[in-house]
Structure formats: C-alpha cells, structure tokens
Image: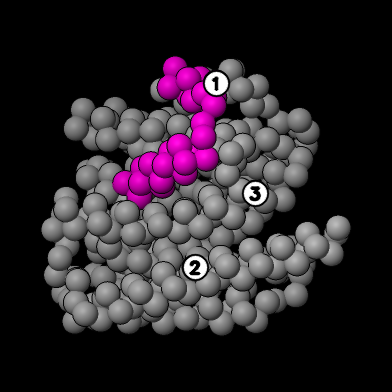
C-alpha cells in the first residue's frame, strides 16, 4: 500500500484521469458497507480493528508524508473528533448488520438534512432555509424508497443509519475547522488513534477478559485489512491528493455517489433485489435530485462569495 501511495503522489494526472481515479476511490468507499456485512464480528470489535489497523497504516505512510500535528494542543481536540468517527462507524456497520447494506446506505443520504441544521450551529452562521428544505426533501425521498412492508429489522437499521449521518456530519464539520491549522493526513492519523484508545477502554469495560484482542480468523482478517488499509488509509490520502487536480466541489459531488455504488454492489453480492420496487426507484431519484440541487446551490453561493471578494 505504501508503494502504491508513493507512486500516486509522484504521478502527474490529467483532469480526466483525476476524475476517474476519484470515482474509483468513491467506489472503494461504497464497498465498506459490503465488507461490514461480510466480516463476522460485532460492530464494536470491527470498528476497533479498523481504527487500529488504519492508524498503523497512516503512521507508516505518515513517515513519508510528515503527517504530524503542528500544534500539540490540538491533540485532544483531534482525539475527541476520533470518538465521533468511531461512533459514526459503529452506527453505520450496525445498521448494515441488523438490516442490510441498501438500508444503511440509503439512510446515510440523510446527511444533507443533518448538515443543514448542525453545520450552522457549529460554524455560528445563519441557517440556510434552502439547505433545510432540500434536506427535508432528501428525507422524504428516503422514506419513499424505504420498504415498510419488508420483513426484518429494517426500521432499526434505518435509525442506526440516521445516527451514522449525525455523527458523520459532526466530525466532517469540525474537521473543516481543524484543517485550517493542521494537515488532513495528521488529523486522520490522530483521529484514528484517539478513537481506537477510547474504544479500547469501552471494550475492556464490556469484556474485562479482553477476548476482543484475539486475532480474528483469516476469513475476517483479510476483509479487515482491505477495509482498514485500502478503503480507509489509502482511499482517504488518495482523495486528499486528488484535490491538487480537482475542486472541492467536484470531489464533494462525486462522493455523493457512494450510496449508489454501494447499493449496486449489494444487489450483485447479497441479491437485495426485493427492495427494488417502483417506490424505491422514485424515492432514490428524489434523494439524488435533492443532493445534486443542494451541491449546485452551495457552488452558486461560492461563486457569489468569490465575486464579492474580487
């Protein structure tokens, strides 16, 4: 993995190659829910291994990238955000385990709604009514697509997925503030370490015998390594690198395709075709349109701000 990243960082990509690479990374992120379903471990142990292995990967790569916090006082803040990352992953993987991959990814689309409410509070700016309205439209689309008549714990899975959206919105917004002082690689490395340490304390409290430290079977371990090093460490740093060639708007817009890629993979691997009713397609279309409109409005506001600055 380290050699692959070094090769990527010295490679000069065209705009088309960068966009294709970004879609590949988003495809990899969409695969995380699949891996969460395939790994036969409780969600808290899965996240513990993911954070620990991802931290090791970033620690090794960080030697090459010099991923160190410039201000040591930020360590506690970053570790705190790492706890939010852990909670985000716990909810996300638990959603996939108690229901299915499609529900977990569908609920994750609600992040637009939670962002419209939480981001203004954290950044101390006025609430944008257009963002709230489009966020509500997204939630409406989710409920239209949700198969209420389908058996199983799909409702519980959707609630966990909404929780993942809330924690994901919180850590993403706070990271935006931290990136004004620290590099993205340094933030990620210390977030994974902070989340790993807190989760270790929590698991010791649940299981004083510390059986969770036992090395999983090779069937689980190979998926954990893919999840931690390819889908987390490599994909994250590669996405940061691609910002040299692509605008944040293009990156954010493409990342919105993660649920689409994940759901398509779930259909192929787990045969979750029973959910694909006409209402599902209609609701999914509403979600995608609202997400794209929200991205377009944000881009339009950015253009206006740039014109005012000029």
Q: Is residue 98 above or below residue 188?
A: below
Q: Is residue 211 left or right of residue 278?
A: right
- Magenta stretch bounds: 3-31
Residue 10's disc is 1
- Residue pointed to by mark 3: 175
Q: Earlier in the sequence, mark 3 or mark 1?
A: 1
Within-10-Å neighbours for mark 1: few <14, some 14–19, many 20+: few
Within-10-Å neighbours for mark 3: few <14, some 14–19, many 20+: some
Residue 145 is drawn in which quadrant? bottom left
12 magenta-colored: yes
Residue 229 is drawn in which quadrant? top left
Residue 122 can be seen, yes or no: no
Whole-percent x and y of residue 38? 22, 45
* Residue at image location 76% in from the left, 30% down from the top: 70
Quadrant of the drawing holding the C terminus: bottom right
Query: What kind of element bears circle 2?
Result: helix
Whole-percent x and y of residue 177? 72, 50
* Residue at image location 60% in from the left, 75% down from the top: 131
Within-10-Å neighbours for mark 2: few <14, some 14–19, many 20+: some
């Amino acid at each position: 993995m380290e050699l692959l990243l070094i090769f990527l960082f010295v490679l000069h990509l065209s705009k088309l190659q960068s966009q294709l690479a970004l879609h590949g990374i988003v495809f990899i992120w969409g695969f995380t829910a699949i891996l969460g379903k395939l790994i036969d471990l409780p969600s808290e142990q899965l996240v513990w291994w993911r954070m620990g292995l991802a931290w090791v990967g970033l620690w090794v790569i960080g030697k090459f990238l010099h991923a160190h916090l410039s201000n040591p006082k930020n360590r506690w803040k970053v570790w705190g955000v790492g706890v939010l990352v852990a909670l985000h992953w716990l909810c996300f993987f638990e959603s996939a385990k108690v229901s299915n991959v499609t529900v977990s990814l569908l609920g994750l689309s609600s992040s637009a709604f939670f962002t419209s409410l939480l981001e203004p509070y954290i950044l101390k700016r006025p609430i944008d009514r257009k963002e709230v309205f489009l966020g509500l439209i997204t939630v409406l689309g989710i409920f239209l697509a949700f198969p209420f008549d389908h058996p199983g714990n799909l409702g519980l899975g959707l609630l966990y997925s909404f929780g993942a959206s809330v924690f994901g919105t919180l850590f993403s917004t706070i990271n935006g503030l931290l990136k004004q002082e620290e590099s993205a690689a340094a933030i990620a490395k210390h977030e994974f370490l902070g989340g790993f340490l807190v989760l270790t304390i929590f698991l010791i409290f649940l299981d004083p015998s510390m059986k969770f430290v036992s090395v999983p079977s090779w069937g689980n371990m190979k998926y954990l390594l893919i999840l931690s090093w390819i889908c987390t460490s490599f994909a994250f740093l590669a996405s940061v690198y691609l910002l040299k060639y692509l605008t944040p708007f293009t990156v954010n817009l493409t990342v919105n395709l993660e649920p689409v890629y994940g759901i398509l993979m779930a259909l192929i691997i787990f045969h979750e075709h029973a959910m694909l009713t006409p209402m599902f397609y209609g609701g999914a279309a509403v979600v995608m349109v609202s997400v794209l409109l929200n991205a377009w409005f944000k881009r339009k506001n950015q253009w206006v701000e740039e014109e005012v600055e000029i």
